[in-house]
């Protein structure tokens, strides 16, 4: 494992397109898993329905016994910790909603060719681990440290650069008591695909910050320049822009598509009468949701909000619709305590990050 | 829930294509989950990595307490059974490899537009339940019965026909002691997406026979004509052929792609030297695997077979490759005890069922 960049070694054939989807995009959609939207009904996403975005391969770890987490770089006391040693530190459990930064990318026109998420890259889990700060305090960060890098054991190429997946946080963000080094998900040991035996969970941020299969923490006197920190995961209007780093989640909401689906088109058919529409809304950095509005063919009304379930957790909402025969488009739109509201049209982004445009659900009422 | 067919109510816009993938195909690939091929390493697929093909929505079942399984039609004693009642019957646990009948569909040219599986719709789990025959013996099948239909609680449209997902078995197949009514997977209660609280598992058959969210068993004096029995799940060379019903799995093998991947293309890079290639091979109806051969750029050698793990379970294989720098295509090909061998080129099928053509893995050795 290394922080050094490697020369470009793989051909790159990707572009913006408004057309049909390439085989590579479909291959990624088959490997990676979205939440089926009907599972928005669960407060905590059941194991196996939580969305999954795996950049390289899921590492095969037969046993956690030999796993070591190395902490080095600009620290006074470099450490090599076993899982059992880490599990002796003070533990806590946090319920956290995570969204992939690329969620909604496939709804942009044109879109960048990569994992073609529509709406499903969003889920909630209960994570058990120890605050990262306990580890950093044990290692004692040197005064000249300005960045803390986290490296997973998953390795591969992206845009021709070979690297272990890696991300960083500034020291003050890393010392936040809610940033966890995690070994349990929903009360069970981490599943292999969620980072067994050890991962980071950074509440309030898009998912890329929550590094899986955590092998090394490197404290740095200069900004971390791994591929997934920069150039990747930046908002850019043009490919050549320097860009703005992707960080906390934007305010957003989704609804459970009502009625029953068509297999291929997923078009919904709903019985006329009283229909309870339900869904979830969330924002980033622990900012509360204050309002969700629902639109029936362009007429907006306020939904009722369920009680909050935690600082970093999506909030349930519900709205009773008196549905009469016809064709409809349903929408939902959330506002947070900062006064930020979802845009009706998604902001265009070069790689399709941070798409929080309103969801549209066409339904036939019969 | 009804066995009756409903009139066509949804527009159908699907075709054969050799081109890029439609938005609907990508939507299905996002909802449904393939096994990431590196997870072929696990004897039993960890929860959350088992492939998933959900025709309609995953039903939301808050508690199993009110769930009833109805058994009716041509029986002497119609039954309405609780989950607790079924769990008092003699239980057994079977390790079973299941493959989706449409696995490999996206590798055909042209392909039918539906869930675009490449290789990943294959997994192995340990299923705990009671042999179906105990339930059928309790209900006592009438002498004129010629088919046994199984209906799930999942409902929707396909090709304009509204129906609950349903499949049937002939009475002698249904009475096989290894056909199970299941409530546990890998030692835990069924997850919602795998059929909570109750499902059928039909070992040796493609996955469509293993009806999830099992609500009703209907014993029939005529052949079951639900959409998923016919016209769907038939091998056809032309759309208008009457077709041959899809039933047991065809002989097949897959390998764990060696080395490390490129994020977008998944192209593999391998270090020169001794490389152990591993994978799995399986057939249908409990027929054992007798041989796996591996090809390096067209030169075939026999792989070593791991010990068998059960009648219905994929068999591990391994082959040590002395890899030298260059570009390669790796292939694997299984033979079963019936003497059936995978075809080098996949047999073309109108809806892409039963594709057991050999896998090809391009790799760069450096």
Image (tube, coloured by chain):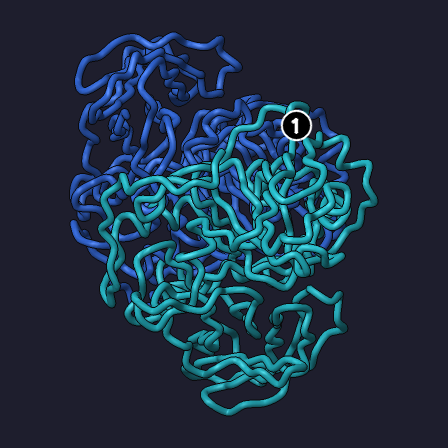
Chain colours: A blue, B cyan
Q: Residue at x 56, y 83 (%)?
A: B341
Q: Residue at x 30, y 57 (%)?
A: B113
Q: Quadrant of residue B191?
A: top right
Foreground: B132 or A202? B132
Q: Quadrant of residue B363?
A: bottom left
Tag 1 subunit: B
Foreground: A238 or B180? B180
In which quadrant of the rendered image does the C terminus of chain A lie?
Answer: top left
Q: Is residue B357 above or below residue B94?
A: below
User: Secondary structure beneath disc 1?
Assistant: loop
Foreground: A56 or B208? B208
In which quadrant of the rendered image does the N terminus of chain A lie?
Answer: bottom right
- Disc 1 target residue: B64
**Which residue occupies the extreme bottom position in the image?**
B299
**Residue A196 in the image: x percent, y percent?**
63, 45
Q: Is residue B361 above or below residue A277?
A: below
Q: Is residue A98 above or below residue A5?
A: above
């Amino acid at each position: 494992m290394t922080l050094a960049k490697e020369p470009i070694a793989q051909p790159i054939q990707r572009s913006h397109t408004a057309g049909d989807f390439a085989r590579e995009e479909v291959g990624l959609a088959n490997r990676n898993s979205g939440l089926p939207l009907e599972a928005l009904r669960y407060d905590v996403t059941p194991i196996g329905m939580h969305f999954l975005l795996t950049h390289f391969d899921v590492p095969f770890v037969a046993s956690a016994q030999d796993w070591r987490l190395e902490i080095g770089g600009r620290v006074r006391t470099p450490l090599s910790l076993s899982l059992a040693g880490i599990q002796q530190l003070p533990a806590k459990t946090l319920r956290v909603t995570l969204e992939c930064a690329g969620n909604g990318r496939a709804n942009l026109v044109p879109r960048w060719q990569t994992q073609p998420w529509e709406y499903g890259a969003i889920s909630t889990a209960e994570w058990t681990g120890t605050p990262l700060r306990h580890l950093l305090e044990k290692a004692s960060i040197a005064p000249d440290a300005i960045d803390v890098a986290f490296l997973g054991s998953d390795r591969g190429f992206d845009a021709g650069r070979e690297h272990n997946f890696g991300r960083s946080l500034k020291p003050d963000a890393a010392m936040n008591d809610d940033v966890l080094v995690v070994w349990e998900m929903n009360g069970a040991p981490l599943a292999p695909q969620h980072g067994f035996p050890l991962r980071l969970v950074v509440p309030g941020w898009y998912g890329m910050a929550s590094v899986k299969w955590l092998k090394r923490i490197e404290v740095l006197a200069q900004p971390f320049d791994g591929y997934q920190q920069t150039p990747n995961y930046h908002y850019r209007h043009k490919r050549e822009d320097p860009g703005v780093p992707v960080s906390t989640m934007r305010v957003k909401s989704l609804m459970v598509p009502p009625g029953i689906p068509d297999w291929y088109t997923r078009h919904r058919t709903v019985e006329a009468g009283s229909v309870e529409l339900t869904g979830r809304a969330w924002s980033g950095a622990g900012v509360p949701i204050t309002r969700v509005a629902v639109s029936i063919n362009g007429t907006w009304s306020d939904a009722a909000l369920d009680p909050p379930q935690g600082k970093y957790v999506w909030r349930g909402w519900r709205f009773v619709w008196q549905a009469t025969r016809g064709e409809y488009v349903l929408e939902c739109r959330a506002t947070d305590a900062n006064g930020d509201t979802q845009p009706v049209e998604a902001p265009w982004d070069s790689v399709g990050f941070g798409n929080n445009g309103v969801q549209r659900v066409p339904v036939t009422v019969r």
